[in-house]
Image: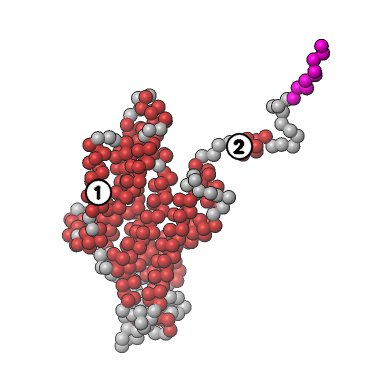
């Protein structure tokens, strides 16, 4: 009884014309960072908002150079650009001219473009610094609270509830004078330096519990994963487990929260400056310019529209960037 002939096929040999390395890269597993970056590169909203924010950041960083090239600064009083009788800007659109492209302030003659660029620096400094403080405190206390059990978790949870129970806006306005003076007594220069420090500290201290709760919820899930149990069984110390094993898996929600918090703090700084809690004149800021423009709005509407429009652009660009990052880091989101 003759057996049937069986042809042998070399399954390991690649077909002619097939790029083996490219195929292996295609089927290889990708990290969350690689997946998110590939999604962001195809997201037009992310690209446009990133370009807008890069331009805004460059304008803020290069404000001294730009104003020096234009021959203006935010503090000089140009008496020739205003009417001596009532301080009204000479010319249309608030005194707009070659020397002052966006016009000058009523009564002072200070250049609006220069004050806008320097005000952008102040607002972004406060927003970025407060966001960094929120991320550091919220991440630290959130990890400790989520990983710990018993009284530590309970104490931190009640402490967060206590901070969240305070009326934020009322507290920051009521305590601005006394706490700013206390910062001056501690060695911080009097004036805008102590006021800016006060705003950063207050925004950071009252803002971290929101992020800490998000981080705590993530850590409650991560601490039951196999890699954490393996680290515990191998005798790893608690700090190593928290900051070498768990923390790298938290950067996605932290990054999303930070990008969404930045525009909120830009707007909050403008509101506080509008209410008189922000920087002192003649230092410019968004809120101070908006507050000064209210009394002249019916006469020269551009005073309100120019800083207001830039504030809207900054806030919307940051919000769109945060939404794009959140969608890119969402593993359940549908992407083409």
Q: Residue at x 78, y 22 (%)?
A: 7
User: Between 18 and 285, which is closer to the camera in this rendering?
Assistant: 18
User: Between 335 and 285, which is closer to the camera in this rendering?
Assistant: 335
Give the quarter of the image for residue 264. bottom left
- Principal secondary structure, stretch drawn in magenta: loop
Q: Position of residue 156 (x, y in %)?
A: 25, 42
Q: Of helix, strand and loop, which one carries label 1?
A: helix
Residue 161 is tagged as: 1
Q: Residue beneath label 2, please?
A: 27
**Which of the two discs, 2 and 1, labels the residue nearer the N terminus?**
2
Q: How many marks?
A: 2
Q: Are there few (<14), some (14-19), or many (20+) residues within 10 Å of tag 2?
A: few
Residue 236 is tagged as: none
58 relative to 83, above or below: above
Q: Which residue is drawn at 34% across and 72% down?
A: 290
Is residue 27 visible in this depiction of the protein?
yes
Is residue 125 visible in this depiction of the protein?
no
Side (left or right) of 125 relative to 34: left
Magenta residues, start to end: 1-9
Q: Residue at x 58, y 50 (%)?
A: 336
Q: In which quarter of the image is the N terminus?
A: top right
Residue 82 belongs to magenta span: no
225 relative to 303, above or below: above
Q: Where is residue 17 in the image (x, y as percent from the top left)?
A: 74, 37
């Amino acid at each position: 009884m003759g057996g049937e002939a069986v042809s042998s096929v070399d399954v390991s040999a690649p077909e002619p014309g097939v790029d083996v390395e490219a195929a292996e890269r295609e089927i290889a597993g990708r990290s969350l960072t690689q997946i998110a970056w590939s999604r962001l590169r195809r997201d037009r909203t992310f690209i446009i908002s990133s370009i807008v924010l890069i331009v805004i950041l460059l304008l803020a960083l290069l404000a001294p150079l730009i104003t020096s090239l234009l021959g203006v600064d935010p503090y000089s009083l140009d008496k020739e650009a205003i009417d001596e009788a009532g301080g009204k800007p000479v010319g249309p659109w608030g005194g707009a001219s070659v020397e002052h492209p966006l016009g000058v302030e009523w009564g002072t003659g200070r250049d609006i473009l220069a004050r806008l660029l320097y005000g952008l620096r102040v607002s972004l400094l406060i927003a970025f610094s407060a966001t960094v403080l929120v991320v550091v405190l919220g991440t630290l206390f959130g990890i400790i609270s989520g990983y710990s059990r018993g009284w530590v978790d309970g104490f931190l949870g009640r402490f967060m509830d206590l901070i969240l129970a305070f009326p934020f806006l009322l507290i920051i306005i009521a305590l601005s004078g006394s706490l700013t003076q206390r910062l001056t007594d501690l060695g911080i220069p009097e004036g805008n330096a102590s006021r800016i420090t006060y705003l950063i500290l207050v925004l950071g201290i009252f803002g971290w519990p929101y992020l800490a709760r998000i981080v705590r919820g993530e850590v409650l899930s991560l601490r039951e994963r196999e890699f954490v149990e393996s680290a515990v069984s191998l005798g790893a110390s608690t700090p190593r487990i928290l900051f070498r094993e768990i923390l790298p898996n938290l950067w996605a929600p932290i990054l999303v929260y930070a990008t969404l918090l930045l525009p909120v703090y830009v707007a909050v700084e403008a509101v506080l400056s509008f209410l008189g809690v922000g920087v002192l004149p003649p230092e410019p800021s968004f809120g101070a310019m908006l507050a000064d423009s209210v009394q002249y709005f019916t006469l020269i509407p551009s005073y309100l529209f120019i800083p207001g429009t830039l504030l809207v652009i900054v806030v919307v660009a940051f919000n769109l960037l945060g939404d794009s990052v959140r969608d890119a880091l969402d593993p359940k989101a549908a992407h083409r």
